[in-house]
């Protein structure tokens, strides 16, 4: 193989594999060094010098002394005929492997900086363990834990997903994507709302129960731009695009407020709040709502209260106006005088926390009480 042929081959390979010529030349240098060491009587170490313009090569050989130093430097460049054979064999046997390694590294670097981005892929495989998405040049893995319950995409379906992790592996980059991550909702709004992409409107917080409901808090850096209106769009067109991509998952768009009590009240939307009482350390809030708004504030199975609590980063206890006034007057209709209802932050279920430190689940409470907690005005989600 002549130098001209080799230079043309490198140029074609670089274009085909989308790898720089400099990278391929370095691969060639490493491969030639490997091939040299397989020669009979080869030195212990060698440094291959390569002119990138002419592809003229020289081999500087070294011995290694007892201390591991490279010594006895000398020129051990093979003859032209032998060098031609070494170069040809190297291209066939070693370059392919090294090029694949360089290609894997390039793909990894391409996606390593994209954690937190959104990608579109075509479902190749979907079973009870994971789904595989074809992103074009690489595949992405979506574990079962990152899939929305009851959302099963058939092979060939095009879906958007959120990159949560990029791992290096022997087969190339392993890209882990998610359909449950709150970041997916944020990125979808960035795609649909130019004001978010431009930084005029910010998504300050997001809480999500995938497949069911999401709450986002938005803020505008421009007093002339309504953040909620920008996200909703004309006739609800923008938010509808996001809802469609999430298979009709409900989305509440809340105006963000620096006033924590005001923000909590808004986070419980669509329920109307009478008053929010914050603890001294601002980690817990007692929320009083009109009697007829209690069920709406708590939501189905406590969902509205849970999402609002995560959105505001505060534990929320919801009470009706009647219950709150009765407690102020020392009247406890349910017979459990000392204690209060609290939402368990892990399960989202309401629990009765008695003054003596004991904790009772809603089911236990209803068994022991003469009437269900819901009938006495308690938050029973």
Image: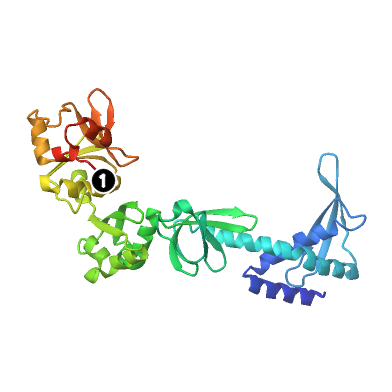
Instruction: Please determine whether, in this image, residue 4 is positioned above or below residue 110.
Output: below
Residue designated by label 1:
302
Q: In this view, does 377 lie above or below 225?
A: above
Which residue corresponds to the image point at 27% horizontal and 56% vertical from the top-left? 218
Q: Residue at x 27, y 63 (%)?
A: 231
Using the rendered image of the protein, determine whether residue 282 is visible from the camera's viewpoint. Answer: no
Quarter holding the N terminus is: bottom right
- Left-right relation of 365 to 38: left
- What residue appears at the point 66 percent right and 71 percent down from the top-left corner? 14
For residue 332, side relative to residue 363 (left or right): left
Q: Which residue lies furthest to the top in this view?
A: 356
Q: Where is residue 163 in the image (x, y as percent from the top left)?
A: 47, 57
289 and 264: which is toward the camera: 289
Nearer to us in this view, 357 or 140: 357
Residue closest to the eye, 258 or 370: 370
Name the residue: 47% across, 53% down: 144
Pinpoint residue 260: horizontal percent, then vertical percent: 21, 44
Q: Position of residue 126 (x, y in %)?
A: 50, 61
Q: In the displayed structure, does residue 333 sit left or right of residue 283?
A: left
Disc 1 packing (10 Å; few <14; some 14–19; many ≥20): many
Q: Nearer the viewer, residue 123 or 235?
A: 123
Q: Judge from the rendering whether residue 218 lies leftward or rightward of residue 147; answer left or right.
A: left
């Amino acid at each position: 193989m002549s130098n001209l042929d080799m230079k043309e081959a490198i140029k074609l390979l670089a274009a085909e594999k989308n790898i720089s010529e400099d990278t391929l030349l370095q691969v060639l240098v490493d491969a030639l060094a490997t091939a040299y060491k397989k020669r009979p009587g080869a030195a212990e170490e060698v440094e291959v010098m390569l002119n990138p313009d002419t592809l003229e090569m020289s081999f500087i050989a070294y011995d290694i002394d007892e201390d591991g130093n490279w010594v006895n430097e000398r020129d051990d460049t093979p003859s032209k005929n032998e060098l031609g054979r070494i170069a040809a064999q190297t291209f066939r046997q070693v370059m392919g492997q090294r090029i694949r390694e360089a290609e894997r590294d390039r793909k990894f670097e391409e996606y390593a900086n994209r954690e937190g981005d959104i990608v579109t892929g075509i479902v190749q495989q979907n079973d009870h363990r994971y789904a595989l998405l074809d992103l074009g040049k690489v595949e992405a893995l979506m574990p079962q834990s990152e899939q929305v319950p009851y959302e099963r995409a058939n092979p060939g379906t095009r879906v958007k997903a959120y990159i949560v992790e990029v791992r290096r592996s022997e087969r190339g980059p392993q890209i882990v994507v998610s359909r449950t991550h709150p970041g997916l909702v944020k990125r979808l709004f960035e795609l649909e709302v130019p004001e978010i992409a431009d930084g005029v409107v910010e998504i300050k917080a997001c809480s999500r129960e995938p497949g069911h409901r999401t709450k986002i808090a938005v803020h505008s850096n421009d007093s002339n731009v309504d953040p909620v209106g920008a996200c909703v769009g004309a006739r609800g067109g923008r938010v509808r695009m996001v809802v469609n991509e999430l298979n009709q998952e409900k989305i509440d768009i809340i105006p963000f407020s620096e006033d924590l009590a005001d923000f909590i009240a808004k986070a419980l939307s669509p329920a109307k709040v009478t008053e929010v009482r914050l603890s001294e350390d601002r980690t817990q809030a007692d929320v009083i709502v009109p009697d007829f708004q209690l069920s709406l504030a708590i939501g189905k199975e406590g969902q509205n209260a849970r999402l609002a609590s995560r959105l505001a980063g505060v534990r929320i206890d919801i009470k009706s106006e009647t219950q709150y006034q009765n407690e102020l007057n020392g009247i406890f209709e349910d017979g459990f005088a000392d204690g209060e209802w609290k939402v368990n932050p892990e399960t989202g279920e309401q629990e009765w926390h008695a003054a003596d430190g004991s904790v009772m689940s809603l089911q236990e409470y209803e068994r022991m009480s003469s009437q269900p907690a819901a009938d006495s005005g308690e938050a029973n989600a």
